[in-house]
Every structure is written in structure tokens, then in C-alpha cells.
Amino acid sequence: MALGLAGCGSAEPAAGGIGGDVTVFAAASLTETFTALGRDFEAAHPGTRVRFNFGGSSALAQQLTNGAPADVFASAAPANLQQVADTGAITEAPRTFARNRLRIVVPKGNPGKVTGLADFADRDRKIALCAEQVPCGAAAKKVFGLAGVTPQPDTLEQDVKAVLTKVSLGEVDAALVYKTDVQAAGDRVEGIAFSEADQAVNDYPIAPLAKAPNAAAARAFVELVLSEKGRSALSAAGFDGP
């Protein structure tokens, strides 16, 4: 398990009992926003360290159901968080903190001349998609069904950032990622909106884990995400409000 570490050194509890390490499992599409919120959390609670495990929500859910220790789970779809809840690992009601929708993404300059979802059925174009068990893949399956398109992917990736990397490196002509990922990639890629995306919006729920090693910090981090500061950061990254 690859954990990104924000902060280092020993940690002592701060005022109010918030201190020590807090481990957050979060959907890959939250990487930039949660990393920034993690720095804010550490600044607000001296003595804390926020450790992130970013990845596909389905893989994170599997790790948690297999007993991986963590304090917070933020998923890109309710089903993956429910999978964890069904094992008794979550006892507090999850709360939706953001929504996201898909965009077509192409390399800068759109060398494949992609204009819409129909182009994903062209075997002559190189296409990347998320695997269906990942929330971005499940949403992609839905929009293709709505559009009556049978995609011909050349690669299926386990999280949305892996798909985005394929596009930004010019390894594929087109892919489907979240609009927030298009924004995060900046001028390395171009995004194309399509109407079916509005019918496949992903809700993002968050909850502290029942056996969180650092329960106080877990709840505090969840509250930060749900706070005005959290909503502002998510909005700036392109997420829709809950």
C-alpha cells in the first residue's frame, strides 16, 4: 500500500485532543484537493500528520474490508463506501460532500480529432477508460449506454489518474475522466463536454472508520471536508456541491 505522507517527525496531541497521525483513504480524483486540505488540517492542529492512500475507490474498499487500518474513507461512489459499511467497519452515516461528472479528455491539440462519444467506438483510435468496477468506469458504462455507443478501449485502468496519465503523455487519442481531472491537468490536455454526463453524476460520500486508530482526528478531518473551507476548495477544483 502506497501512502503519501504530509509532514514528518513525531506527533504529540494538540489542544482539544487532536494530534498524531490520521490516515485517509480517498478516491484518486480527490488527490489535489485533499492533499491541500491535509496541509490545512496540519496547520490548524499542530502535532498532526495526515497520511493519504489515494486510488480507485473499489480497490480502497477492498483493502478496508480486508482489514487495512485507516481513519477516514472518502469514496467516489456510495456503493464502494457501502461495501465497507456492510462489514461493520463504518458505524456513522456517510455524508455526501461533493459530486462529479465525466468529460471526454484528449491530448493537447486533439491529434485524434475526437468530437464526441461516438468516436470511442472507432477501432482506429486509441482509447483509455477506467475499469468498470471503478466509479469512473461505472459512470462511463452508463453514459455509453445512454448514447447507444459500444466503446472499443485499448486499455482499462484501475483509477482515473492512470487514465489521465495516458492522455497527458499522448499514449491515447481520448479517454473519459472527471471534469475535475481535466481541470487539474491544465494545458496538458483538452476537455470536451457531452450531454449524457449530466445523467451519470457521481456522489462522493465520506465517513470515519469504526475502528479508526485516531477517532478524534478522523472526525475532525471529516468536519474540515464538510466545512465552508472544504466546500470552497472542492468548488475551486471543479467539484459540484452535494
Image (spheres, rainbow, N blue to C red):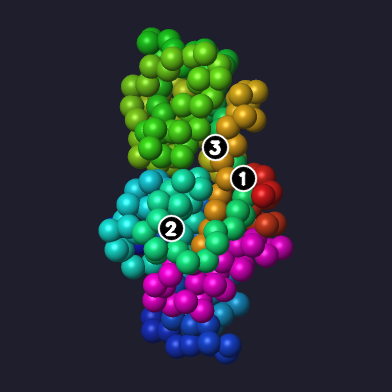
Q: Residue at x 53, y 87 (%)?
A: 17
State the extent of the magenta-drawn residues as a range: 208-230
Give the crowd class for mark 3: few <14, some 14-19, many >=20 residues within 10 Å: many
Circle 3: element type: strand
Disc 2 secondary structure class = helix
Q: Position of residue 4 (x, y in %)?
A: 39, 61
Real-space CA distance between mark 2 and mark 1, rounded to the nearest whole angstrom: 20 Å
The residue to which callout 2 is attached is 85
Front in this rendered view, residue 82 or 34:
82
Q: Amino acid at mark 1?
A: Arg
Three-letter code for the amino acid on which mark 2 is drawn:
Ala
Residue at mark 3: 178
* Disc number lying in front (1 or 3): 1
Residue at horizontal 44 percent and vertical 33 percent from the top: 137
Residue marked by disc 1? 99
Question: Toward which corner of the image does residue 132 lie, by quadrant?
Answer: top left
Confirm or deny contact between disc 2 and disc 1 (CB under 8 A). Answer: no
Q: Nearer the viewer, mark 2 or mark 1?
A: 2
